[in-house]
């Protein structure tokens, strides 16, 4: 007898009952074959960054920043920046290639899977990459004594929210652009400036007054401020609720845009 199961059923292969979890499992299977290549860089990059910026540049910042050593002030910004960049990297070429080159999404929608399941499953994998990269950075910086508060454990969920706030709208962008050259433009004119001018390396207050609202509008600045408050054990510049609601708004709007973009590309 041939066993027939629905999309939400558990087949003989042991697939999850939730379709989005099956999509997530698909990416985990691929990552299981490649994760070793990234382990070394996941720990080496934080070491080089902390040594180069925290001790190298920090040696010239005699008075520290906001009353703390430059290394302690810098590390949470670097952690938030890492989560931000991993979220963008995993949401650009991987998403675009699944439409244009590999056409994985077309195979998944023919499985059949719903568009929402495809988006949710892939986003879950992106957030998995964000959290694992963040935890690796936390472990390295803890060895340098740069985590000054027990509240540093909150950095992982903060990075998760920041990653979702960034990845969801980038999913929509990557799904709609006709060529991967637009992805390079995204990095050149959005990711790099946002990394440099969102309070990661120096306080936003040191920028010209007219540019500060631009920095405050970026999701990265909110992630940086929350991470800095957590690792230093101080109050953030905004309220915690304000930061969370702002990042949640980015995530919600991005999710809606991603669903629209995926449906337009996949539904004929």
Image (tube, rainbow, N blue to C red):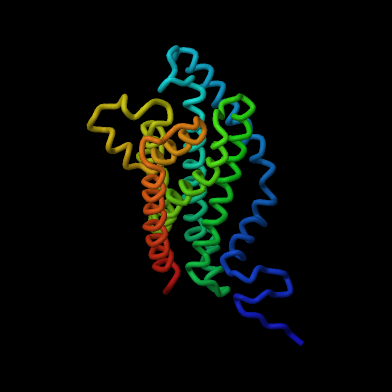
Seen at 36% across and 32% down, the residue is 197
- Looking at this view, name the residue that lies furthest to the bottom: 1
Taking the image as shown, residue 13 lies to the left or right of residue 91, namely right
What percent of the width, then of the height, locates residue 254?
Answer: 39, 56
What percent of the width, then of the height, locates residue 37?
Answer: 67, 41
What percent of the width, then of the height, locates residue 234?
Answer: 45, 32
Q: For residue 148, which quarter of the picture?
A: top right
Q: Which of 152 and 111 is in front in this view?
A: 152
* Residue 69 drawn above or below residue 28: above
Taking the image as shown, residue 252 lies to the left or right of residue 48, namely left
Q: For residue 16, which quarter of the picture?
A: bottom right
Q: In this view of the protein, can residue 246 be seen by the observer?
A: yes
Q: Quadrant of the C terminus?
A: bottom left
Q: Nearer the viewer, residue 252 or 257?
A: 252
How many numbered discs sit on the rendered protein?
0
Q: Quadrant of the N terminus?
A: bottom right
- Looking at this view, name the residue that lies furthest to the left: 210
- Looking at this view, name the residue that lies furthest to the right: 1
Seen at 55% across and 43% down, the residue is 156
* Residue 218 drawn above or below residue 25: above
Seen at 38% across and 51% down, the residue is 245
Q: In this view of the protein, can residue 182 be seen by the observer?
A: no
Q: For residue 258, which quarter of the picture?
A: bottom left
* Residue 35 drawn above or below residue 114: above
Seen at 63% across and 61% down, the residue is 26
What percent of the width, then of the height, locates residue 41?
Answer: 62, 35
């Amino acid at each position: 007898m041939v066993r027939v199961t629905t999309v939400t059923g558990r087949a003989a292969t042991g697939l999850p009952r939730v379709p989005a979890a099956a999509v997530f499992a698909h990416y985990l299977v691929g990552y299981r074959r490649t994760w070793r290549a990234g382990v070394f860089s996941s720990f080496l990059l934080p070491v080089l960054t902390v040594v180069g910026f925290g001790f190298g540049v920090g040696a010239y910042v005699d008075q520290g920043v906001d009353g703390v050593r430059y290394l302690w002030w810098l590390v949470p910004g670097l952690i938030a920046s890492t989560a931000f960049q991993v979220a963008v990297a995993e949401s650009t070429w991987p998403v675009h290639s699944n439409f244009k080159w590999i056409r994985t999404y077309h195979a998944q929608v023919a499985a059949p899977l719903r568009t929402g399941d495809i988006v949710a499953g892939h986003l879950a994998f992106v957030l998995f990459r964000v959290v694992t990269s963040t935890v690796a950075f936390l472990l390295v910086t803890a060895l340098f004594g740069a985590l000054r508060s027990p509240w540093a454990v909150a950095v992982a969920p903060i990075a998760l929210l920041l990653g979702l706030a960034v990845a969801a709208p980038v999913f929509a962008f990557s799904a709609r652009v006709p060529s991967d050259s637009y992805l390079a433009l995204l990095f050149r004119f959005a990711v790099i400036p946002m990394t440099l001018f969102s309070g990661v390396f120096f306080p936003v207050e040191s920028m010209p007054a007219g540019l500060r609202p631009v920095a405050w509008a970026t999701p990265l600045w909110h992630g940086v401020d929350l991470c800095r408050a957590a690792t230093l054990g101080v109050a953030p510049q905004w309220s915690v609720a304000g930061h969370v609601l702002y990042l949640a708004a980015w995530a919600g709007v991005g999710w809606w845009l991603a669903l629209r973009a995926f449906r337009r590309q996949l539904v004929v």
